[in-house]
Image (cartoon, grey):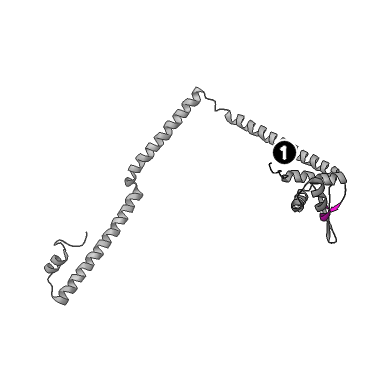
Amino acid sequence: MSKKKGLSLEEKRTRMMEIFFETKDVFQLKDIEKIAPKTKGITPMSVKDVLQSLVDDSMVDSERVGTSNYYWAFPSKALHSRKRRQEELQQQLSEGHRKRAALQQAVEKAKVGRQDTGDRAALLTQLQALREERLQLSAELDKYRECDPAVVEQIREFNKTAKDSANRWTDNVFSIKAWARQKFGFEDRRLDKTFGIAEDFDYVE
């Protein structure tokens, strides 16, 4: 024999609301904890959580008096709540219809001038051709960047810096050779051969 299925949360909430609607009375938590399991089959352990969920959703009113909390819910309030919720949903639906109509109108407006006519197709083809030509011209222009005066000047500055650096190192080599010649009496030929210095090694003009 299969085990009896327990009540879902929504079923418990519905049955607990029945307690308030049928009695039209005000209860403390301890009262609900006694009534709910006996009359509505709600498990004692879940009574407090179910009641709190109804309070959180404004379906059950709650007020603290002294050290005790009192709970109540009348059918009239539930009716007003449903009507208010229905009005909110109806307003949202109307707003959704309005936005949909506005979007549809915008789509129709955007379609104007975009019909697939022969002229439009020709213009699109021409536009694509112009875009390709622009890419080709940009690539061709890059080839002639070396003739750009700014680029030429940049190359000249780079060459000057490289020349100055090379001559500075050449000066250092000559200084070291002179020091070695004075210190150890080495001849220039011997130094050049030992360190692989070419015979025509000199400053860059």
Name above or below for residue 112 compared with residue 191. Answer: above
Q: Nearer the viewer, residue 201 or 73?
A: 73
SS assignment at label 1? helix
Q: Quadrant of the C terminus?
A: bottom left
Residue for point 58% across, 29% down: 111
Residue for point 69% across, 36% down: 96
Name above or below for residue 44 compared with residue 191. Answer: above
According to the picture, the residue beneath numbered tag 1 turns out to be: 92
Q: Nearer the viewer, residue 128 or 69?
A: 69
Image quarter of residue 63 = bottom right
Q: Is residue 28 magenta?
A: yes
Give the magenta-colored segment's residue range. 24-31
Residue 45 at x, y = what percent?
A: 74, 53
Q: Nearer the viewer, residue 61 or 155?
A: 61
Q: Nearer the viewer, residue 95 or 10?
A: 10
Q: How many marks?
A: 1
Residue for point 27% across, 62% down: 165
Image quarter of residue 79 = top right
Q: Quadrant of the N terminus?
A: top right
Residue 84 at x, y = what percent?
A: 79, 41
Q: Is residue 204 magenta?
A: no
Crowd tier of the residue under label 1, counting other residues whose Cα lies within 10 Å: few below 14, some 14–19, many 20 or above: few
Name above or below for residue 204 compared with residue 125. Answer: below
What residue type is disc 1 on?
A: Gln
